Image (cartoon, grey):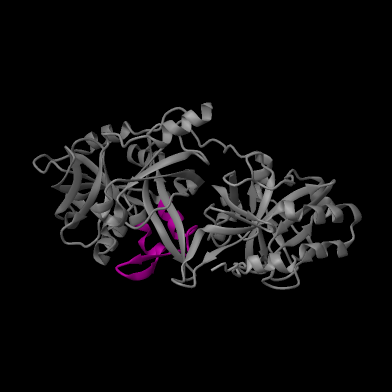
Amino acid sequence: MQRQKEASRFYTGVIPPIPQHGTIFHTSGSHKASAIFLDEELVITSGLIFSDNESLNQTVADATKNSSIVELGTELKEIFDLDFRVVRKQENVLQQQAARAYHIVHSHRVRECMETVLEGLHVCIGGDMKPVRLYAPLYASIVILSTNLAKCVSWNHIKTVIDRLRPTGSTGPKLLDEVVTVSTPFGDESFFNTLNVGHISNIFGDHECLMLLDTHLSSGCQGGAVYNRNMKLQGILIGSTFTHRNENVSFPLAISMEEIVGVALNQRNLCQSLPMALPVQAFRSVCMIDSQGCWGTGCAFELNGKRYIISCSHVLATDNITCVFNDQKTMHPKLIYKNPIFDSAYDIALMEATFEEAQSSNWFCQLANYIPRIGQRLYAVGFPVLKSLARGINFKPSIIPGRVTKYSEGLLFTDCSIQCGQSGGPIFDENGLLVAIAVSNFKSSVDNLIYNCHNMCVPVKDIYSTLERYSITRDKTSLDGLQADWNVRCKWKLKPPVILNKL
């Protein structure tokens, strides 16, 4: 009951009057972004406000190469002289006013992350798909403006205002924190100050400078706000949708407020992100699987004293398999079973840890021998889109909450935001039990788009008896039960069910 009251209080929260929110653009450009008012005059937004101008992109890149704080009035007159306009709501009416940019706060940690860890992502700029790394300086920059054109804003005044945003105590972001984003989708005032509720699914980069959210955002969100459940500012949005290998991906990114404050004040807050609510052993059981260039996610589990790794057949190109776990530990399991019929249910591969590797590890979760109910809370864990999040000290699997949306024998549907790279990844319940294996999401034949929140998973309950039988008998022929019957295979191919016509 207490949890229900807290959730109710959170989801019915309102936009705080200070800081206010709005949209921003400059009259010589065509791009609109979201913005946050820090007080009645100071405004902040993302450096992506300059993304439609190649010259300004290069100007910002050069100016921030060796500097974290750029004073525009003396160093970048080209930007200082731009005619900015900010739209905000006053007395329930949208009003436009002029603004001037005074400073840029630039995070070299975010810049490096956008150039390296997020290498491979592309973003739509002016109708063309461009590599994200080319715009890394803009993603890593926050622009500070003022609507009071009659008064020059000093850096000391800006630092005083920014200092109020410093995270204190235990208010720093942590995995699975509930968050509210406030932005204006598409930069269109018809969607002015839209709220989206979601969670922090990953925190990565040097000093944990970037947050990955599971909220459903769109272009124009850049410069919008990320709040925690107490409506304290946690970050500034810098991205939402990208493409990877010509497929659309949802990858909502935000710079943490701690990073912005730390750069602006040249100091770091001592509070650090706390561990997530998901049981640690379940989280440790997740691994990135690499099979000679083909990669995905896997999960280590224990059954009757035997220890295995489970994933999808389509993740394994060969039986030369490397599993990378937390703390840079690796395992080279023996392939026991791989569905011999490609693209047929169940898309399951089973591997066994060697005796030496299994003895010294604490990486193994437990299986859930039950059918999850509709609406039950679940957690998808894996490496969406980018293999780089599993490299060395950057080992950062994402945790995406969701719920069961449908169950039919042999097939579980969830609304977790699952994307490429999470194939074979675990779906846990709140107790850390392995409920299902993520296989695929839905790609529409109508618009050729991937819908990452409509995904299909293998329920562990429906293969539990087969796995248990093998763990006891060690008879590989018993694993033939991992090949689904005709009815289940039809469901996985989304063949329409029989409809009786009573007309």
Most distant residue in the left direction: 150
Q: Is residue 30 magenta?
A: no
Residue at left 33%, top 40%?
264
* Above/below status of 363 relative to 344: above
The answer to whether residue 291 is above or below residue 173 is: below
- Residue 248 visible at all: yes
Viewer-side residue, 410 vs 142 = 410
* Left or right for 266, reference 300: left
Q: Nearer the viewer, residue 251 or 418?
A: 418
Residue 351: quadrant of the picture = bottom right
Q: Which residues are magenta?
A: 110-137
Taking the spot 26% from the left edge, 59% from the top edge, the residue there is 50
Q: Position of residue 341 (x, y in %)?
A: 73, 73
Question: Could you say where residue 247 lies in the image, as x and y percent from the top left?
Answer: 48, 68
Q: Is residue 287 above or below residue 234?
A: below
Q: Residue 458's quadrant in the figure?
A: bottom right
- Residue 3 is situated, as x and y percent measured from the top left of the image, at 52, 30
Residue at 24% across / 50% down in the picture? Answer: 23
